[in-house]
Image (cartoon, helix red, strand yellow):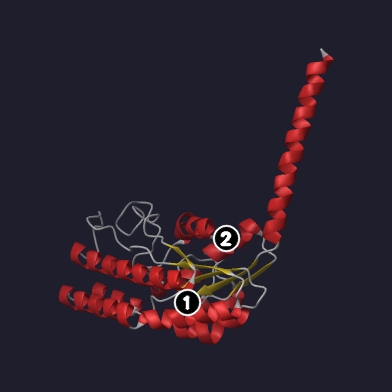
Amino acid sequence: MLRPARAMSVATLAAFLSLTTLFTASSAQAAGVNYVALGDSYASGLGAGSYTGESGNCKRSTNAYPYLWKNAHAPSSFAFVACSGAKTGDVLNSQLSALNSGTTLVSISVGGNDAGFAGTMQTCVLDSESACLNAVATAKNYATTTLPGKLDQVYAAIHAKAPNARVVVLGYPHLYKVGGNCIFGIGDTKRAAINSAADVLADVLAKRAANAGFAFGDVRSVFREHEICGSSTTWLNSTTLPVEESYHPKASGHSGGYLPVFSAQA
């Protein structure tokens, strides 16, 4: 009766040692990562609350996807320099100093402010349908004609500063569920136009990222049914207070949307 019990103990011990080896290897791999998070408010976590005291108006949140990834993987170093309101020029001038030849992982969300995201949303919420459609058309034109060159500059500078890093470019979600069940707010024509601008921006980001040899994380599908007017579990703020947090992901949008997309690419 003792032999089967002994055999089971040996098997259990072997399994335990195997799991321990895998855990140790995984920990060692995470310990070798030097991660820098760049970008705008969609990277900093504006709208997700729990802002760090040192970040001031940059509104860096402990609920933002870079911070959540850091907590889950315990990298050797973590520099969170994304800032609310940042454009491509701000990344070039104020954020790239966090990179160096030892950086192994970079995330970046930028381009929406260059294309006039905030002004377009203000026009669509407050003005007529025609004014909204014109604002969206202007944003799309900028995204396809001027933004690509600005992104190329940023991506080239990232590669120059951190030549050994894996770089993940994150896009932007659709803000609205067209045909959704909102009682108040803008109509479906405006909603569809705003979403179409997100599609154009995603195409531009994906192409420029691929051209630079970077990965692209498309968050549109994972946010589906969690858009404004989509369900009771929306991951995005609608018009809210403070106003600057409007049309940005909630904490649930970072944990349920951005984090898994980034983790899959990182």
> Quick one: which residue is furthest to the top in this view?
1
Residue 127 visible to the viewer: no
Q: CA distance from mark 1 to mark 2?
A: 18 Å
Please tell me whether residue 152 is drawn above or below residue 16 in the rendered image: below
Q: Amino acid at mark 1?
A: Ser
Q: Is residue 32 above or below residue 154?
A: above
Instruction: Say the numbered circle drawn on residue 68.
Output: 2
Is tag 1's residue or tag 2's residue first in the polypeptide sequence? 2
Mark 1 crowd level (few <14, some 14–19, many ≥20, 10 Å Cα):
many
Q: Is residue 192 visible?
A: yes
* In the image: residue 184, left or right of residue 160: left
| The N terminus, quarter of image | top right
Asked whether, in this view, residue 251 is left or right of residue 138, the answer is right
Q: Can you identify the residue that label 1 sits on?
A: 84
Of residues 169 and 128, the one nearer the viewer is: 169
Q: Position of residue 41 (x, y in %)?
A: 46, 73
The answer to the question of whether label 1 and label 2 lie on touching residues, with beta carbons closer than 8 A, is no
Callout 2: SS: helix
> For residue 132, what is the image quadrant?
bottom left
Nearest the viewer among 86 and 36 is 36
